[in-house]
């Protein structure tokens, strides 16, 4: 087993990984940029090394600086988290060349699945169902025109090296194709340095469902159930849950077996996620593979009882999976909310600044993976994800109830967050009825905006509760001081509720 692991990331995922390291008796080393000197992952780590300016290109994306920190610290492995260098084959190869174990798949597996077109070609050979379209980038407008006519409109243009909605365009009619193709290519070049764009049939109102897989370095691969990821804004996931409300055991088995086939065809090891689009007839199609730990991995951990980060580390250390497919059991339901420093009432504009008050939820069935604390300054230089709030219950209704209660306890002062958005989602009747697809959130927001309802009522209540709690702790401290000053003051410190319940005060 490793003695020391360097975590090449920041924020809540860095905190998540270092906690796993400490649970396993492994020293945790972190790196930080200039603006992250006081970040939570730095405060909790065993060792921390500065790696440069705030710009990610000069710090968290700088391979040479991260490997130098690994050398100086004596780390024998690197966990990349998600984002930044987590799916960078060049980084995985550089780690191997430096004699440091990369906790993730091999560079070859990343390259096989990193390009969507190469992945489609590989899956075509493996007999994996995928959305009709091209398995290579289109070379001309004329070719695009022919393919679109063959598969039928609407069609989706996608960047081969893409992700996060970049280089993606939905085309409803032939007249939109040329301008959309030019725009997709231009955005793909700017975002990824690769202008390759391919075409696939656009599935109307699909669900986005993904399957978690684990593969050790001894040829064993298992699937751990699916996650429903259909609630998205601008192709970015907002809320995830497991299991999916529409997936029954038979569909889960079929999707899982396809996901395992995808991983094995790519020679994949460690934790990965195979993503599918599911149409209204519950047909599923391979979309892509994410060659890293996902943001939403906690919901899978809660319903399986497995710790994915522990397993990642053990796999990278050469251990075999300690269980087989038959041992995987799904129990209960989990839902995750991504808490961002952004203002949902101002077009989700980023909201950096100092956190002046933090009231965190807890209680039965609540998990909070967080990278923030009261008094911390949220920088504007990175993704605004602050924390993840997860509710778990014996069934979906209980998970919703617990998460609704937890959101009413959650308050972050000094900056704006999207907590109010999740209160609206969990109240929505279509959400409660599991009538979900990738267009759900846009429809819900339009519907609620049209309603003459005070959408801020719950948030106002939460703010009032936060102020009451803060004032209550101040009053309690004052009461303790008063008790020390003599009998008369002590009488006033007694709770009025206690007095009200005494028999002599009852009529």
Image (cartoon, grey):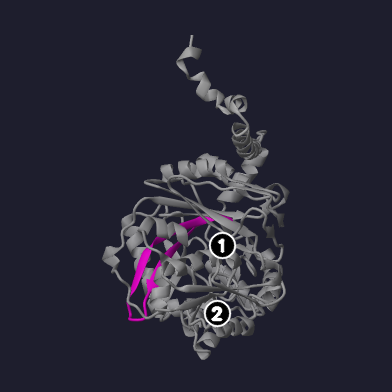
Residue depth check, mark 2 versus mark 1: number of the one nearer the observer: 1
As drawn, 355 above or below 4 = above
From this viewpoint, which residue is outermost toward the left? Answer: 326
Q: As rendered, which of 98 and 210 lies closer to the eye?
A: 98
Q: As rendered, which of 58 and 455 lies closer to the eye?
A: 58
- Kindly indicate the quadrant of the structure image that contains residue 349: bottom right
Secondary-structure class at tag 2: loop
For disc 2, the marked residue is 136
Horizontal and vertical percent for residue 343? 69, 50
Identify which residue is drawn at 52% across, 91% down.
97
Residue stretch rendered in magenta on the structure = 208-232
Secondary-structure class at tag 1: helix
Q: Residues within 10 Å of mark 2 (few under 14, many from 20)?
A: some
Q: As rendered, which of 475 and 374 lies closer to the eye?
A: 475
Question: Main SS type for the magenta part?
Answer: strand
Horizontal and vertical percent for residue 94? 55, 87
Task: Say whether disc 2 or disc 1 marks the residue closer to the N-terminus.
Answer: 1
- Kindly indicate the quadrant of the structure image that contains residue 318: bottom left
Looking at the figure, which quarter contains the N terminus?
bottom left
Q: Residues within 10 Å of mark 1 (few under 14, many from 20)?
A: many
Identify which residue is drawn at 70% across, 51% down.
415
Q: Is residue 469 left or right of residue 178?
A: left
From this viewpoint, which residue is outermost toward the bottom? Answer: 97
**Is residue 113 inside the magenta stretch?**
no
For disc 1, the marked residue is 12
Identify which residue is drawn at 50% across, 24% down.
498
Horizontal and vertical percent for residue 464? 65, 36
């Amino acid at each position: 087993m490793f003695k020391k692991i360097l975590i090449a990331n920041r924020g809540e995922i860095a905190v998540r990984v270092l906690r796993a390291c400490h649970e396993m008796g492994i020293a945790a080393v972190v790196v930080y940029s200039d603006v992250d000197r006081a970040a939570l992952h730095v405060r909790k780590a065993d060792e921390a090394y500065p790696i440069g300016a705030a710009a990610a290109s000069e710090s968290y994306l700088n391979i040479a600086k991260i490997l130098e920190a690994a050398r100086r610290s004596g780390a024998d492995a690197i966990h990349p988290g998600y984002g930044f260098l987590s799916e960078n084959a060049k980084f995985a190869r550089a780690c191997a060349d430096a004699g440091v174990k990369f906790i993730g798949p091999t560079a070859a597996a990343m390259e096989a699945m990193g390009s969507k077109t190469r992945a489609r070609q590989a899956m075509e050979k493996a007999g994996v169902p995928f959305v009709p379209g091209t398995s290579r980038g289109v070379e001309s407008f004329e070719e695009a025109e022919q393919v679109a006519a063959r598969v039928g409109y609407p069609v989706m243009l996608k960047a081969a090296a893409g992700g996060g909605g970049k280089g993606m365009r939905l085309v409803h009619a032939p007249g939109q194709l040329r301008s959309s193709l030019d725009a997709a290519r231009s955005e793909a070049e700017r975002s990824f340095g690769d202008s390759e764009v391919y075409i696939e049939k656009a599935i109307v109102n699909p669900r986005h469902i993904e399957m978690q897989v684990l593969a050790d370095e001894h040829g064993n691969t298992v699937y751990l159930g699916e996650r429903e990821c259909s609630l998205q804004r601008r192709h970015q996931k907002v809320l995830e849950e497991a299991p999916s409300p529409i997936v029954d055991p038979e569909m889960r088995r079929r999707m899982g077996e396809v996901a395992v086939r995808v991983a094995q065809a790519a020679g994949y090891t460690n934790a990965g996620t195979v993503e599918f689009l599911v149409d209204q007839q519950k047909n599923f199609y391979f979309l892509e593979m994410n060659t890293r730990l996902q943001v939403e991995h906690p919901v899978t951990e809660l319903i399986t009882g497995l710790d994915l980060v522990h397993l990642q580390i053990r796999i990278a250390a050469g251990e075999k999976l300690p269980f087989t497919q038959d041992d995987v059991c799904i129990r209960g339901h989990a839902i995750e909310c991504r808490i961002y420093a952004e203002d949902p009432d101002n077009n989700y504009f980023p909201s950096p600044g100092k956190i002046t008050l933090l009231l965190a939820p807890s209680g039965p069935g609540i998990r909070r993976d967080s990278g923030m604390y009261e008094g911390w300054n949220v920088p504007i230089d990175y993704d605004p994800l602050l924390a993840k709030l997860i509710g778990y219950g014996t069934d979906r209704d209980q998970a919703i109830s617990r998460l609704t209660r937890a959101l009413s306890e959650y308050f972050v002062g000094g900056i704006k967050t999207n907590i109010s958005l999740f209160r609206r989602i969990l109240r929505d009747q279509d959400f409660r009825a599991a009538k979900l697809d990738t267009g759900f959130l846009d429809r819900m927001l339009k519907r609620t905006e049209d309603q003459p309802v005070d959408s801020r009522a719950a948030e106002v209540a939460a703010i009032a509760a936060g102020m009451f709690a803060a004032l209550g702790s101040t009053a309690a401290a004052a009461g303790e001081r008063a008790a020390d000053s003599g009998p008369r003051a002590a009488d006033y410190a007694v709770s009025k509720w206690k007095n009200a319940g005494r028999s002599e005060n009852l009529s």
